[in-house]
Amino acid sequence: MKLSKYIIAFLLLGTVIFIGCDDGKEVEFYLIQRTKDYFNFTDNTRWVYDVVSDSSHPVETYTLQNKIRNIRAEGNSEIMAYDLVRDAQYKINVRCEVGPTEFADRISFLVEEGASKTVSAFVWAQTHRFYAENNDEINNIGADTLNGKAYQDVWQLKTKRNGDFKEIKFAKGYGLIYIDFKDGRKLCLKELNK
């Protein structure tokens, strides 16, 4: 009986010391590697797309600008966002953030045209896959060839959202490789300059 009192006292003392050593810093939650593999690029990265739906405008170029990456106070979780800027009036904002749990990241694509802003696609990333919301359809198509270039680890999202996109494809290390807009415009990645 005496020995158990010493053990309990020792455990209580150890707990007090452990709590006293806590620096008060909360656990931070970071974006999973899958999110970074598909969507983490540096400022001034450029995507040059062939406009396959309109021969009068053969290419569109998007440049990554305004990248932020930090830990939000709310939920102590990482957020990464940037703009893919075509011109002063048109850009696609890519926003990646740790989801409501540590098991999934939220990735949204917001199209800004002038003063208008529309969420045009939305996916979730987990360590082993991406998934979509209710009526949207997402598929891992593996290898795909677009514009004569072969890509691996390609995902295809078909969205019924009221945004600007009908379908997008994104590939590991490349981000958006294909965009099919609801207005009929279609972009295929021609060149990526990191």
Image (cartoon, helix red, strand yellow):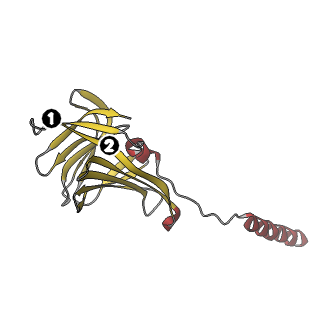
Q: Is residue 167 above or below residue 141?
A: below
Q: Is residue 58 shown left or right of residue 121?
A: left
- The residue carrying mark 1 is 58
Q: Is residue 35 above or below residue 9?
A: above
Q: Is residue 16 above or below residue 103?
A: below
Identified at 23% across, 52% down, the residue is 90
**Disc with the residue nearer the chain's start (1 vs 2):** 1
Question: Cα distance, mark 1 to mark 2?
Answer: 17 Å
Q: Is residue 80 shown left or right of residue 151?
A: right
Identified at 41% across, 43% down, the residue is 43
Q: Looking at this rendering, what residue extends furthest in the front direction?
A: 88
Identified at 69% across, 63% down, the residue is 23
Residue 74 in percent (x, y) is at 49, 67
Res. 48 image quadrant = top left
- The residue carrying mark 2 is 63
Q: Amino acid at mark 2?
A: Thr
Question: Element at badge 2?
Answer: strand
Res. 22 image quadrant = bottom right
Q: Is residue 69 shown left or right of residue 82?
A: right
Number of callouts in the render? Answer: 2
Nearer to the camera, 165 or 1: 165
Residue 26 in percent (x, y) is at 60, 64
Q: Is residue 7 shown left or right of residue 59?
A: right
- For disc 1, the neighbor class at 10 Å (few under 14, some 14 to 19, many from 20) is few
Nearer to the camera, 194 or 4: 194
Nearer to the camera, 53 or 24: 53
Q: Amino acid at mark 1?
A: Pro
Q: Looking at this rendering, what residue extends furthest in the right direction?
A: 2
Q: Is residue 112 above or below residue 155?
A: below
